[in-house]
Image: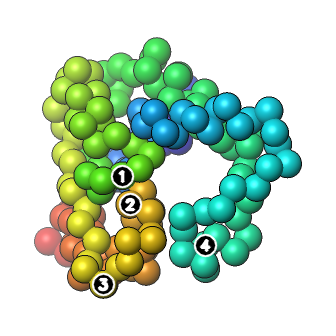
């Protein structure tokens, strides 16, 4: 959303960005969701932990908007995006292809973007999605502390 806002609104600018597994490209498996969009009442089990998944139902409108945002990014990405950007992503992300994300950064000449690989703590179960990296419960306390410290450095906090 941050990239899309930056591209859509000419009066919007950022000094820096932090992106968590940004959906600038989507895996083939992720695009399979498009085939299910004609069935808006269908509920799909979440890969998220119970605390997040308990109220989750497939939000079809936001999913459609996500695909539109990816298309918009691919058609309109420009130099305005080349600001100091820190990206957190797990190499095994099921939704955002890690290799493709790096290719986009290179192809779009986003040389001010830095990718920080997230490796979940060993006690985090395999049943938690690799795409889910938003808090201590989803990555583990050690990795979450590393994420926090990296963000602080990115924004020059505490220096």
Local secondary structure at mark 3? loop
Horizontal side of residue 52 vs 54, given as left or right: left
Whole-number angstrom distance, CA of label 3 to CA of label 1: 18 Å
Q: How many labels does the image show?
A: 4
Image quadrant where residue 158 sits: bottom left
Q: Residue 123 carries which label?
A: 3
Identify the secondary structure beneath mark 2: loop
- Quadrant hosting residue 110: top left
Label 4 or label 3, whichever lies nearer to me, is 3
Report how far apart the C-alphas of labels 4 and 1 lie in the structure: 18 Å
Q: Which of marks 3 and 1 is nearer the N terminus?
A: 1
Q: Would residue 122 be found to the left or right of residue 131 on screen?
A: left
Residue carrying label 2: 130
Q: Could you tell which of marks 4 and 2 lies nearer the N-terminus?
A: 4
Q: Residues within 10 Å of mark 4 (few under 14, many from 20)?
A: few
Q: Where is mark 4, residue-wise? A: 52
């Amino acid at each position: 959303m941050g990239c899309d806002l930056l591209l859509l609104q000419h009066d919007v600018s950022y000094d820096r960005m932090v992106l968590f597994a940004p959906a600038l490209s989507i895996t083939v498996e992720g695009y399979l969701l498009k085939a299910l969009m004609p069935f808006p009442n269908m509920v799909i089990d979440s890969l998220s932990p119970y605390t997040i998944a308990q109220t989750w139902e497939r939000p079809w409108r936001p999913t459609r908007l996500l695909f539109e945002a990816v298309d918009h990014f691919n058609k309109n990405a420009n130099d305005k995006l080349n600001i100091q950007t820190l990206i957190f992503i797990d190499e095994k992300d099921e939704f955002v292809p890690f290799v493709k994300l790096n290719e986009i950064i290179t192809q779009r000449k986003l040389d001010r973007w830095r990718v920080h690989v997230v490796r979940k703590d060993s006690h985090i179960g395999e049943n938690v999605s690799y795409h889910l990296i938003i808090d201590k419960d989803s990555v583990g306390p050690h990795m979450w502390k590393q994420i926090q410290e990296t963000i602080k450095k990115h924004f020059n906090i505490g220096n």
